[in-house]
Amino acid sequence: MRYRQAIALLALVGLFVALYLWLHALGFGGPIKCGTGGCDTVQTSPWAVFLGFPVAFYGVVGYLMVFVVALAALRPAALAEPKWNLMLVGLATVGVLFTAYLTSLELFVIHAICRWCVGSAVIITAIWIVSLLSLRSPAIRTDRGASPPPRDPRA
Amino acid sequence: MNRFYVVLACLAVVLAVGTFTMLRSGGGAPAAATGAPPTVGDDGFRGYSLGSDNAPVEITEYLDFECPVCASFAIIQMPTIKEQLINTGKARWRYRDFPLPNHRYSRFAAHAAQCAGAQGKFFEMHDQLFYNHQWAQTGKDPSRLFRDLARAAGVELTAYDQCMNEGRYAQRIEFSRQEGDQVLVDGTPTFFANGKQLKFRRLPTSDDLKAVVDSIIASGPARR
């Protein structure tokens, strides 16, 4: 359960990072807050748009999916089901691969690094690692027989 | 479990407020570049100029980037003036800022042009501001559009942002405006030929300016 909670929290942070970049790409706000980074170079490059949509839009969709699945997996009825862990691993793997592709473009093609993209890469990598760890953890049993015996109040 | 959802909700609120604040603070024309500076200094700058240093006539134009007549002049008359007077070496054209007080983003536009000029892109930005002059009719904050125009003009945006945020050329623009006041500029565009103000009953055409330049050359006075 802790793993799924961690994934939900990380996905929420990632969602807002992607949301900020997406809204900026749509024209909201002024200059991107980037410090001395190359966010403008990255955001205005031809690779900032993927299949007709700003790259950040895919981040919003991806993080939202991870977030929703993580919350769904935290329902009491779903806690014992390992299939949710598999779904989270699958989503995180897609996210990590897409992020690796984008990061390689930044490093080797655009030659500029956007700090927000690095932040997102760290978040999705963390989600991926946590989701992999969740595969190793035993599923939580919710049947009464598996519950620990009640403690003796006199003890 | 309940504590987790409280933490999640708190985090969502913090992130939403942070995102909103960043978007809000990221926008807007920086006050340092929009308003008149508290003090005015002369940095020795006397305007960007087009044409040969040896041209016998120097035309000085006091302009306001938000002024629609200035835009009309820049778009319709200047191409011919460049062809007939500037490229032929007859005249040199000097731009001076004269932001009118009733134009909200006039100083800001002048500042954008100056910040582009710091990167050698004044004339490209000048054209971008006039050829995309719809910003002057909307009344909306043009800061983001100006960045796009600066990018289109070939300006490097990190240095541009820094220049705009610190209002680096606010004093220069105000100095130019005060200089215009001293030589009795009362509207834009106002033209001077070798220091003498030109009076026209309407917005001059390229033919009007050509007649003035030809007349000065024919009479053979030394350029001031």
Image (spheres, coloured by chain):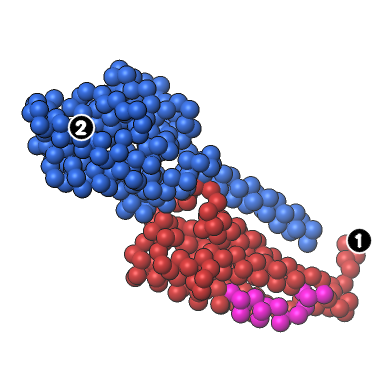
The chain drawn red is chain what?
A
Amino acid bearing label 1? Pro
Categorize mark 2 by other alpha carbons within 10 Å: few (<14), some (14-19), many (20+). Answer: some
Marks 1,2: beta carbons within 8 A: no
Query: What residue is at 38 percent from the left and 41 percent from the top?
Result: B71
Give the color of chain B as drawn: blue
Query: What residue is at 42 percent from the left and 48 percent from the top?
Result: B132
Which residue is label 2 attached to?
A: B212
Q: Is residue A98 above or below residue B76?
A: below
Query: What residue is at 70 percent from the left and 72 percent from the top?
Result: A69
- Tell me the magenta residue range: A77-92
Q: Closer to the camera, B168 or B183?
A: B183
Instruction: Determine if the magenta segment contains residue A74.
Output: no
Categorize mark 1 by other alpha carbons within 10 Å: few (<14), some (14-19), many (20+). Answer: few
Instruction: Classify residue A138 by image quadrant.
Output: bottom right
Q: Closer to the camera, A136 or B81?
A: B81
Amino acid bearing label 2? Val
Which residue is label 1 attached to?
A: A153
Residue B59 location in percent, x, y?
22, 32
Q: Closer to the camera, B81 or B94?
A: B81
Majority secondary structure of the magenta segment?
helix
In which quadrant is the N terminus of chain B drawn? bottom right
Q: Is residue A139 visible?
A: yes
- Chain ID, mark 2: B
Q: Closer to the camera, A120 or B146?
A: B146
The secondary structure type at the circle numbered 1 is loop
Marks 1, 2 in one chain: no
In which quadrant is the C terminus of chain B drawn? top left
- From the viewer's perspective, tell me whether residue B201 is left or right of residue A7: left
Which circle, 1 or 2, is nearer the viewer?
2
* Disc 1 to disc 2, C-alpha distance: 106 Å
